[in-house]
Image: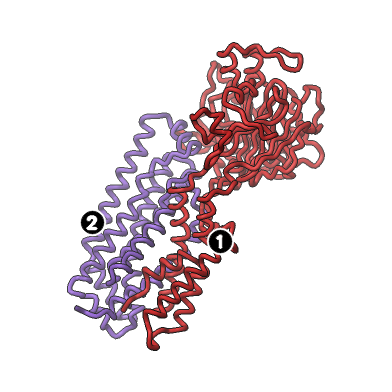
């Protein structure tokens, strides 16, 4: 079993290595652009005024980061699963001698693992760029503000996978609606850190969605091939 | 495994729909109404208010002369007013319009008030519930303005402080590093006056848009209240003498030109205490029914009265006091001479709200007026038993019937049918849409 799962990880790694590299480069470039924006604030105004705007007025100089996790997640999911849908290649994997649930979960875990590493890198860069200019309270608030965006990225990945794997058009809509419904509250414009109390509740929904993704996988496996 | 996956997706779908559908419905049909604006009229000697209404009010439309017929002006006896009469009843609020119409100076209760006198006495202090600690993300790093900046305008300081167990720690904005000397100076001075670190609450008006710097108030770890002013770079500290049993919870500071009241203290028993600027004495206000965690509070000072307006989502209450006399002693409590409660128009039902209560048996919401923090909260339909439940029954019965008719000849699974019907019965439209989308025809 372990060998098969390791094989799946290896296969996914080979398949998506170019996509992973491109997404990492895009993330690094985007974070550099955000850093330029933050740095420019301190060139244009005195630091205490920038602190006032960010810490008292609630302006978010790194607000552009909100869309990055969701965009990266959607692109990576397409790169991971669309090639599997061509000529129904995923069926080959589904015939491996291990349970369908473990096999599909291994695919999803691989995607989630890559995204987690990518988001860790983004979070680390965000911390480094803010730590230099702002007191620790502002950095802590930035973590609480950006966590929902990263969580929205995980939801976007799983819901895109749902929409790709599901063979029936009507049911595919569930993936799209769930993606919109789960990501929208996390990407709402709110006061910095205001979503922090809701995050544990949202995190509880991740395993639920992961288990639910077995339904489109089963629909894919057991559908009639035209 | 299929059943487990189906249940997981159904739960998710119902959760998402119970947030999204009511939200879409409200956006399309049920726009939120602002809170009622209520005042005490020194002319009528009763409360008078203005509010937006849903639907049509014939008398309000007649008074509006066809313009903004959804805005109602009424007094506490239910008498309707037009806009001009409303403004005339509140000369201390609309004094600039009064002056323009040649109605100033004004004679009331044997006293004459011109524009300058009204401007001098008028001020508003507001404490919305969402400003209380625990109702917004914490912001422990604050600026301490210099009270004597050596120029007319106040200057924003280049450092900020936080009050930790170690003391009052200042951080300089240019270097983003702690200022050891300044931190030691303030921490030592505070400790010498009996301040026990850390601070439970720090209250102040951290802005330069005010006539002068009145300092900040800090509640120490034991519940004692201290006033701290930064003058010439040195700390000026006053320990406030608290009336018996008062433990401050929140301090609102608002400097104004009249320099009579510096703000007010909200204590742990939900009592309000005005802070007199001259001697830092606390003068109590007896406001019945005030629950700060769920209510917004507004203090309106005018040349004759002090009106306290408290309101939750549905009810607004005014409590009117004579202006506290300057010779009142620390800890004295003022009693109101007039109170009035009113159910706001936003709480009244309309066909839109009744339809929503029928369609949606419950809703998931994150936003609450009394807090900036977003937490998921379910609320049941206000007419769950009379409207939502029968509608759910209708949907569930219809679903069962259609499924039974579509699979005749023993193909119908009664167990599955019962489970699906139960889902619709419990969740109404949300469950129905979920099943319509998720159920695999194959």
List the single residue furthest toward the bottom. B410
Please name the residue that numbered disc 2 is placed on.
A22
Quarter of the view holding residue B334: top right
**Left or right: where does residue A94 sit relative to residue B95?**
left
Quarter of the view holding residue A91: bottom left
Asked if both marks, 1 and 2, belong to the same chain, the answer given is no
Residue drawn 68% across the image and 26% down it: B41
Callout 2 environment at 10 Å: few (<14), some (14 to 19), or many (20+)? some
Answer whether labels 1 and 2 touch (C-beta < 8 Å).
Answer: no
Q: Which chain is red?
A: B
Q: Which chain is purple?
A: A
The image position of residue B251, as x and y in percent, is 66, 36
Q: Nearer the viewer, residue A195 or B393?
A: B393
The image position of residue B99, as x and y in percent, is 59, 13
Tell which tag, 1 or 2, sits nearer the viewer.
Answer: 1
The image position of residue B304, as x and y in percent, is 72, 22
Tag count in the figure? 2
Residue drawn 81% across the image and 32% down it: B332
**Left or right: where does residue A129 sit relative to residue B108?**
left
Q: Quadrant of the N terminus of chain A?
A: bottom left
Residue drawn 31% across the image and 67% down it: A172
The image position of residue B185, as x and y in percent, is 62, 32
């Amino acid at each position: 079993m372990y060998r098969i799962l390791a094989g799946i990880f290896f296969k996914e790694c080979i398949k998506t290595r170019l996509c992973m590299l491109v997404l990492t480069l895009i993330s690094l470039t985007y974070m550099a652009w955000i850093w330029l924006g933050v740095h420019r604030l301190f060139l244009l105004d005195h630091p205490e005024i920038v602190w006032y705007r960010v810490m008292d007025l609630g302006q978010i100089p790194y607000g552009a980061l909100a869309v990055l996790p969701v965009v990266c997640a959607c692109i990576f999911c397409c790169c991971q699963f669309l090639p599997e849908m061509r000529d129904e290649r995923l069926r080959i994997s589904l015939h491996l001698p291990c349970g369908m649930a473990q096999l599909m979960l291994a695919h999803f875990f691989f995607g989630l693992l890559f995204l987690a590493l990518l988001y860790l890198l983004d979070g680390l860069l965000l911390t480094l760029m803010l730590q230099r200019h702002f007191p620790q309270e502002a950095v802590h608030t930035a973590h609480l503000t950006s966590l929902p965006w990263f969580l929205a990225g995980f939801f976007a990945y799983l819901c895109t996978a749902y929409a790709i794997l599901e063979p029936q058009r009507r049911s595919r809509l569930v993936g799209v609606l769930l993606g919109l419904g789960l990501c929208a509250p996390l990407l709402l414009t709110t006061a910095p850190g205001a979503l922090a109390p809701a995050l544990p509740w949202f995190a509880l929904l991740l395993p639920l969605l992961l288990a639910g993704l077995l339904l489109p996988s089963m629909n894919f496996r057991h559908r009639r091939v035209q | 495994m299929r059943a487990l996956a189906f249940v997981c997706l159904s739960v998710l779908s119902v959760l998402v729909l119970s947030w999204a559908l009511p939200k879409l419905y409200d956006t399309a049909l049920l726009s939120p109404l602002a809170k009622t604006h209520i005042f005490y009229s020194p002319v009528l000697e009763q409360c008078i208010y203005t509010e937006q209404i849903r639907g049509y009010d014939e008398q309000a439309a007649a008074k509006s002369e066809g313009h903004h017929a959804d805005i109602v002006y009424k007094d506490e006896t239910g008498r309707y007013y037009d806009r001009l009469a409303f403004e005339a009843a509140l000369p201390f609020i609309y004094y600039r319009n009064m002056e323009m119409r040649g109605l100033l100076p004004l004679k009331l209760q044997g006293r004459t008030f011109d524009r300058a006198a009204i401007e001098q006495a008028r001020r508003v202090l507001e404490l919305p519930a969402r400003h209380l600690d625990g109702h917004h993300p914490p912001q422990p790093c604050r600026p301490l303005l210099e009270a004597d900046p050596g120029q007319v305008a106040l200057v924003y300081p280049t450092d900020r402080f936080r009050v930790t167990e170690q003391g009052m720690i200042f951080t300089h904005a240019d270097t983003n590093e702690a200022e050891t000397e300044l931190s030691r100076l303030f921490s030592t001075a505070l400790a010498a006056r009996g301040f026990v670190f850390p601070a439970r609450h720090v209250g102040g008006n951290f802005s330069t848009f005010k006539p002068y710097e009145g300092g900040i108030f800090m509640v120490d770890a034991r519940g004692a209240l201290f006033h701290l002013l930064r003058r010439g770079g040195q700390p000026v500290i006053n320990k406030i003498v608290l009336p018996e049993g008062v433990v401050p919870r929140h301090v609102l500071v608002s400097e104004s030109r009249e320099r009579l009241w510096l703000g007010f203290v909200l204590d742990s028993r939900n009592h309000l205490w005005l802070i007199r600027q001259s001697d830092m004495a606390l003068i109590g206000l007896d406001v019945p029914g005030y629950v700060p965690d769920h209510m917004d509070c507004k203090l309106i000072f005018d040349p004759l009265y002090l009106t306290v307006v408290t309101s939750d989502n549905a009810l607004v209450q005014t409590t009117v006091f004579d202006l506290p006399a300057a010779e009142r002693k620390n800890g004295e409590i003022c009693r109101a001479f007039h109170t009035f409660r009113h159910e706001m128009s936003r709480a009244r039902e309309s066909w839109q709200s009744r339809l929503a209560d029928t369609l949606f048996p419950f809703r998931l919401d994150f936003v609450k007026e009394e807090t900036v923090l977003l937490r998921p909260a379910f609320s049941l339909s206000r007419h769950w038993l009379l409207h939502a439940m029968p509608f759910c029954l209708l949907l569930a019965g219809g679903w069962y019937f259609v499924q039974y008719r579509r699979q005749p000849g023993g193909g119908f699974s009664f167990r599955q049918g019962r489970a699906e019907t139960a889902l619709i019965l419990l969740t109404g439209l949300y469950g129905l849409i979920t099943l319509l989308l998720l159920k695999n025809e194959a």
